[in-house]
Amino acid sequence: METALLPQVVLRELILQDAEDRYNWCLDKDVTKHLNMPEKYPPFSKEETQTWIKMCIAKTNGYEQKAILTEDGKHIGWIDLKNIDRLNKHAELGIAVGDKSYWGKGYGLSAMNEMLHWGFKELKLNKIWLRVEIDNEKAIKSYKKMGYIEEGILREDRLRNGEFVDRLRMSILKNEFYSKVDI
């Protein structure tokens, strides 16, 4: 994947002020449709969102979560590694571009590229995997573009709107990621 064609992003540690953007993004059902969130509206109160951000900052919830910023510093989403298995050297990736005006423009790919570099180098992981609902075609396409490989279907893996949906498990290995040109 040629990153020269992608927009530049910066991943930074979360700050408490990120809670306001996060709360507002989660009011948009297009943004939360494929995210694993409680089935209520809004999915989280402002206070719950602030508490979550505080836990991420303090690193007490098992998430290595970072804010996604555009090159000019606009906060547009978040990305994380969770379910980190240091013994077996793998973790699960999660990502959300909350600001819909940045959808489909390569910002998610750029953020994934940065997070994969970070996970493989800083956390010394060998594999970074994810779960994606099988009807989230845009996300699956972007994960494949990044180099993720399908591992299998997790049957009825998420309860969404009162119905179970299948999720696809995908992963990328460290050697696969670094064997790609221009990454």
Image (spheres, helix red, strand yellow):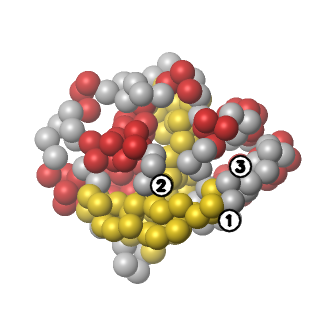
59 relative to 130 in the view: left or right: right
Q: Where is residue 164, by image quadrant?
A: bottom right
Q: Quadrant of the C terminus?
A: top left
Q: Residue lying furthest front in this view?
A: 163
Report the front residue among 145 and 17: 145
Q: Classify mark 1: residues with Cα within 10 Å, few (<14), some (14-19) or many (20+).
A: few
- How much space separates mark 3 and mark 2, taking CA atoms? 25 Å
Residue 13 locus on image (x, y percent): 58, 44
Q: Classify mark 2: residues with Cα within 10 Å, few (<14), some (14-19) or many (20+).
A: many
Which residue is tagged 1?
A: 60
**Mark 3: secondary structure:** helix
Q: Classify mark 3: residues with Cα within 10 Å, few (<14), some (14-19) or many (20+).
A: many
Q: Mark 1: which amino acid? A: Thr
Q: Is residue 13 above or below residue 62?
A: above
Instruction: Look at the numbered discs 2 and 1 and tell me whether their residues touch, using CB distance below 8 Å.
Output: no
Residue 161 locus on image (x, y percent): 67, 54
- The label on residue 28 is none
Residue at (19, 57) in percent of width and height: 176
Q: Quadrant of the N terminus?
A: top left
Q: Mark 2: which amino acid? A: Glu
Q: Mark 3: which amino acid? A: Ile
Which residue is tagged 2?
A: 133
Report the front residue among 109 and 30: 30
Of the image marks 2 and 1, the number of the one nearer the N terminus: 1
- How much space separates mark 3 and mark 1, taking CA atoms? 10 Å
Which residue is tagged 3?
A: 53
